[in-house]
Image (cartoon, coloured by chain):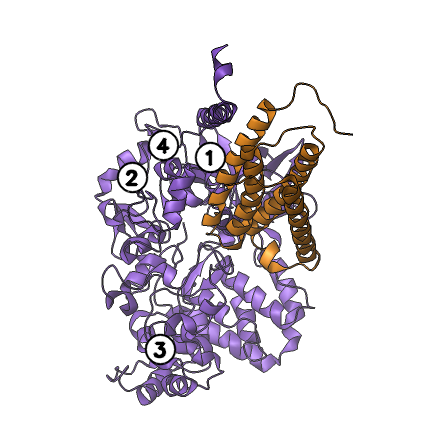
Amino acid sequence: MTFLRISKPLLAWVVSVFVLFTIAAAIWAVAPDYASVRAGRADAGYLESGDCRKCHETNYASWHATFHRTMTQEANPTSMLGDFERENTITYQGVRSEMVREKGAYWMKFTGIDGVTQQLQIVRTVGSRRIQQYLVKTGDAWFRMPIAYDLMQRRWMHLNGSFFFPDGSDYKQHVAEWNVNCVFCHNVKAQPGLDWEKRTWQTEVAELGVACGACHGPAGEHAQRALSPLTRLRWNLKDEIAPERLVVHPAKINSDRSAMICGHCHGQRLADPQHRIRPMMSVGDPYDPGENLREFYKPVQRDDKVESFSFASRFWDDGSPRLTAYEYQGLTRSKCFTAGQPGARLTCISCHSMHAGDPRGQLTEKMKTNAACTQCHEQFAAPTQLVEHTKHSATSTGSLCYNCHMPKIVYGIMTAHRTHDITNPRPDETVRFGKPNACNQCHLDWSANQTIATTQRLWPKTLAQSEPHDPRFDEPEGQRALFAGDAVHRALTVAAMTPATDATGPLLLEAMQDNYPIVRYFAANALAALHPNLPKPDYLAPVLVRAATLAIWSPLWAPERLQAARAARERLTPLRSETDVEVGE
Amino acid sequence: MPAPSHAALIRQGWISLAVWIAFGILLEGMNGFRSPAFLDDAVRREMFRLAHAHGTLLNLVLLVAALCARLDLIRLGRITALGLGTAVVLLPAGFLLGGLWHFKDEPGRGVLLVPLGAVLLLVSAVYLSLTLPKKASPKR
């Protein structure tokens, strides 16, 4: 045969090249087609985290540890964090709820006052850090149930205990359609799929939970190019003529666009103009990370309305957000942001790390300290300058930048959070806007007027102008806000009083009379932190049950102190600056 | 380039085997003493393991091939001897260097030695199979 006449060295090369080509062909034949993934859909090019993991193992692992990943999950033994076996019932407003696991599925059974029982199967979960909420599917829609599991207190709760709604609200007030709202921020690239004519849903997401695509955008083309080891090597060598990476890296883009990636969810927004909500609900969320969010949405501000619905109660009177999920609005109001160079200024990842640090807050240990602020304000890094600036000792909590410039005056999911509206402490804002101020978060026994006078003396440049004296603010601010503030202010004041002290105990017993369960929630926690061995008052229990528990607590304080606290509540409650608020949805 | 003698290949094989066995002991030690430099670095861990496995196994192959050639069981031509001798160095060294200095989640540029060594190894193996004597005549 002819080939036998070929020299053996040459034949060896020919055979080897043939083998190599065969191997190359086999690899090519089974190569994934990332470039056309989900083609024709609103989430075209969006990969799932498992695809990204193949190259980005480290980042996958750090993301996997976050609460972002577990924001929305299918119901299974791993994702279900509630107690479905032992402490698995709750009775609230006469409705008894029992949560059980039967035949491998999870159920909520509601028995109303009329004795009728309704049983619904839980198919998905929302949240995994503070509370876990549960979704059932009816037809083509998912519904959020009114009962959730409080992961911090390890107990079942009605959502009235998390949102700002008073006792006596509709039991089903918080049953919400997931496809309409929740789907947009708790998943990657939501496509509600609403047929406006038939009112049907075909809801799809690129991935359940907040995964890679939520921050890095569609990466199909990137992954396609990255299939070549030579391309990856050139990217790693930072070869200037290497093919474009075609994926968004929030740390490497314009800082304002980077903040918008987070602001897409951490900054409640409205379709802009509002009629664009129609294609958003049918086709899907048009925003991709890296784009200008303002081309599609307007961040909700205090004066915004949708028809007759006002968002005002979600903000303090000066326009500063007072609920979580408005961090973007807070940041963009801050001087730290507005004074910077557009595109190269403070952004979320100046402090937060999505792939490092504590998943609770996504902060590294360093960024939990003053180092976060001295990145820019380095003049306050030295203890002498710090003490000169804060008028507190260097080791005092009053010398931690966050406590004065980002006080905990924002409420979200049963926790007081730091505002992202980074400002100088202004006790006069309590008088002018009914907004808690940083000083009185610690100095609860000072009146706002006393705090204003002290601030004027210690920081004359910050608060030079003298406010007209308002005698309503001569009360100790902790006590005043606890009874005369609106529900959000009251809850945040109780949070600031946690743990309770001997001095605040009688006031907190009075706060247990509040008609907002969430205020009682904070009060019960504050009291339990003072005396963990006493029975903890149940903030969701009926009045008589709560009274029986509180009767065990009352003898801890002298009757005259209890009486003084009651008198303060009765005197201050009529002074509440506004009517009750209903916020939180 | 002159082909290395059988004796030279055997010497190379034993010395390399000793080196890669020593490297294996180092890996065991890092495992045993929970060295973060090894255990906490997934890319390095994988590359070092591959370097150790390829280094020891390929040098065993080299030793067997050199001994067979010495016993006239096979003929190690210039190409095979050079190819084998070079491949058994390049392949594990590529893994070692690729793990020692690497990019985030990717081996370093040293790993480029691996495909080079693999091609040489393939060509050597093919050539050896083509030049095997039809009937073995061991030298007694």
Question: Which circle, 2 or 3, is nearer the viewer?
Answer: 3
The disc numbered 1 marks a residue on which chain? A
- Between the residue at mark 4 and the residue at mark 1, the CA separation in whole angstroms equals 31 Å
For badge 2, the amino acid type reads: Pro
Circle 4 is placed at which residue position?
Answer: A35
Q: Earlier in the sequence, mark 4 or mark 2?
A: 4
Where is residue A391 drawn, in percent x and y?
40, 87
Let me know if residue A217 appears in the view: yes
**Label 2's element?**
loop
Where is residue A418 drawn, in percent x and y?
42, 66
Circle 1 is placed at which residue position?
Answer: A142
Which picture quadrant has residue A229? top left
Q: Tell me, by letter, which chain the rendering colours orange.
A: B
Q: Earlier in the sequence, mark 4 or mark 3?
A: 4
**Label 3's element?**
helix
Where is residue A125 drawn, in percent x and y?
53, 42
Pointer 4: residues within 10 angstroms few (<14), some, or many (20+)?
some
Circle 3 is placed at which residue position?
Answer: A378
Let me know if residue A113 appears in the view: no
Q: Tell me, by letter, which chain the rendering colours purple.
A: A
Q: Do marks 1 and 2 share a chain?
A: yes
Q: Do marks 1 and 3 share a chain?
A: yes
- Between the residue at mark 1 and the residue at mark 2, the CA separation in whole angstroms equals 22 Å
Question: Which circle, 1 or 3, is nearer the viewer?
Answer: 3
Do the residues under discs 1 and 3 have CB atoms within 8 angstroms?
no
